[in-house]
Amino acid sequence: DTEVTQTPKHLVMGMTNKKSLKCEQHMGHRAMYWYKQKAKKPPELMFVYSYEKLSINESVPSRFSPECPNSSLLNLHLHALQPEDSALYLCASSLGGRGTEAFFGQGTRLTVV
Amino acid sequence: GQQVMQIPQYQHVQEGEDFTTYCNSSTTLSNIQWYKQRPGGHPVFLIQLVKSGEVKKQKRLTFQFGEAKKNSSLHITATQTTDVGTYFCALPFGNEKLTFGTGTRLTIIP
C-alpha cells in the first residue's frame, strides 16, 4: 500500500466552525507533513511530525492545530478560520531524513465562508 | 523563509516540442527532488539527484544536477499532452524539511 489517504476531499466551513482534516498512511513512514497550497502556487510547509512528535512548525497561526495520534494518522484541527485560509491542504509522508521521497495524499480542498 | 526560484514560470509548447525548466538555489544542496503535479492533482515524486553533475533519464525526461550542486534542470523531449502539469523542484533543508520551488507550469498545444 503506497497511498496516503486524506478525508474529506472537499470541505466548506464557516468562520466560527470547528472542523478536522484527517490523513492516514500505512507505509511505516516516520515523518508526516501538512502543506498548504494556494492556487497557482507551490505547496507551503506548515508542520512536520517525526516519530509522532512535532518537529517543525513554520510559524503557523494557532487556529491550525496539528495532532499525530499514532504513527499512521495525522490530523489538522481547524478553528476560527479566515476566508484567506481557503486552499488545498496536502498531507504527505516519508521515511524521514534527508533524501527520502514524499508521498502526497490527494488533498482536502477547503473553502472558508 | 527559503525561496527557490524556478524558471520559466509558465511554458506553452506545441506538442512534440521540447521543454526545459531550471531550478536555482543560493546555497549548496545535499540533494534535490523533482515532482509533477497534474491540474487538479497532487504532487507526485519523479526523481532525486544526489551527486554533483549527475544526469538521470526516465524515458523522455532528463534530469541534471549542477556541478556546484546549486542548480538543476528537467528536460522533456518531444512533449506529449500527458506531460501537462506543474513541475516543482524540492529541496531538503535539515532532516525533515522539504521546500518546494516556485514551479513551472507546462501547457501543451495539440
Image: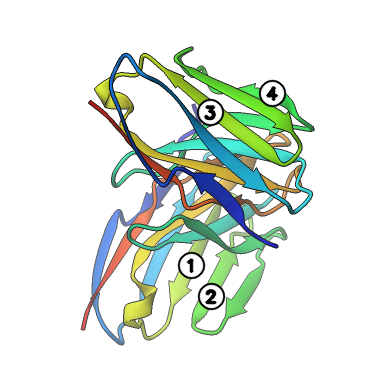
- Residue A5 percent location from the top left of the image: 57, 50
- B9 left or right of B93 in image: left
Pointer 4: residues within 10 angstroms few (<14), some, or many (20+)?
Answer: some
Mark 4 falls within which chain? A
Pointer 1: residues within 10 angstroms few (<14), some, or many (20+)?
Answer: many
Question: What residue is shown with label 3?
Answer: A76
Q: Kindly state the secondary structure of the residue where label 4 is placed.
A: strand
- A48 left or right of A30 in image: left
Taking the spot 49% from the left edge, 26% from the top edge, the residue there is B1
Instruction: Relative to B27, say whether A113 is above or below.
Output: above
Q: Residue furthest left?
A: B109
The mark found on residue B62 in the picture is 2
Taking the spot 27% from the left edge, 65% from the top edge, the residue there is B11
- Spatial CA span between label 1 and label 3: 34 Å
Question: What residue is shown with label 4?
Answer: A54
- Spatial CA span between label 2 and label 3: 37 Å
Instruction: Relative to A18, say whether B95 is above or below.
Output: below
Instruction: Relative to B78, say whether A45 is above or below.
Output: above
- Residue A110 percent location from the top left of the image: 34, 36
Instruction: Relative to B101, say whether A101 is above or below.
Output: below
Residue type at numbered disc 3: Leu
- Spatial CA span between label 2 and label 4: 36 Å
- Spatial CA span between label 4 and label 3: 12 Å
Residue type at numbered disc 1: Leu
The mark found on residue A53 in the picture is none
> Which badge, 4 or 3, is on the more N-terminal residue?
4
- Spatial CA span between label 1 and label 4: 33 Å
Q: Kindly state the secondary structure of the residue where label 3 is placed.
A: strand
Question: What residue is shown with label 1?
Answer: B74
Taking the spot 59% from the left edge, 45% from the top edge, the residue there is A92
- Spatial CA span between label 1 and label 2: 6 Å
